[in-house]
Amino acid sequence: MPELPETDIRVQETYKGLMSRLMFLAGNGLNGQTVLDMQTEIERTRFNFKAEYGYDFPPIGPFILPYSNLILFFRKDLTNTEIRNKLLSLLRDLGRQKIPVLTMELTKAVERLWPSYKPPVEEFRKDPKVRLQ
C-alpha cells in the first residue's frame, strides 16, 4: 500500500500524536521495557493509520543512545547515504553540545534500526567535530 506524503495533514497529525505518546513513554526511563512499549506504540499507530486512511504510515523506529540519554526516531527505509548523513549530522551536533557517544552504543542503535547498514566508525572518529568514544 502506498504512503501519503509526509506533508499531508493526516500524517502530520498522526506524527504529532505518536511523538507525544512516545515522549511520555520515554519519561519512564531508558530500559528494555520502554523500548518494547515504544515499538508497540509505533506498530499500533501504523495499524490504526492504515485502517482509518487506507495508506501506510511511514516506517519509523527508535534510535536509542542510553549513555548519551538520547532517543530519536528515524525512518527505517533510508538509503545508506541518507543514514550516513543523518548519523554524521547527529554526531556533530552532539559533539558541539559536548555530549559523548560510545562507539558500541552507536553501532548497536544502528544495528537495531538499520540491520543491513554498517556505520563507518573510523571515518566518524576522524571528524574533528565528532566526540566518539
Image (cartoon, rainbow, N blue to C red):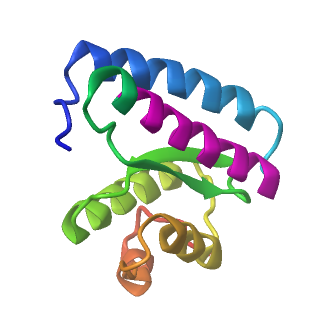
Residue 40 belongs to magenta span: yes
Classify residue 102 by image quadrant.
bottom right
Percent position (x, y) of residue 32?
A: 79, 58
What stretch of residues is rendered in magenta? 31-49
> Is residue 31 in sight in this rendering?
no
Above or below for 76 versus 3: below
Q: Residue at x 45, y 19 (%)?
A: 16
In this rendering, is residue 63 above or below 13? below
Which quadrant is the N terminus positioned in?
top left
Q: Is residue 41 above or below residue 109?
A: above
Residue 83 image offset from top left, x and y in percent: 31, 63
Identified at 29% across, 38% down, the residue is 56
* Rendering quarter of residue 121: bottom left
Q: Looking at the rendering, in which quadrant would you find the C terminus?
A: bottom right
Q: Is residue 47 left or right of residue 83?
A: right
- Residue 116 in picture, x, y percent from top left: 37, 80
**Lateral position of residue 42 relative to residue 119, left or right:** right
Residue in front for this viewpoint, 80 or 4: 4
* Magenta stretch: includes residue 78: no
State whether residue 26 appears in this view: yes
**Percent x, y for residue 39?**
60, 48
Indicate the quadrant where residue 122 lies: bottom left
- How many callouts does the rendering have? 0
Residue at figure coordinates x 77%, y 32% from the top left: 27
Magenta-drawn stretch, dominant element (helix, strand or loop): helix
At a point 24% along the width and 71% down the height, the residue shown is 80
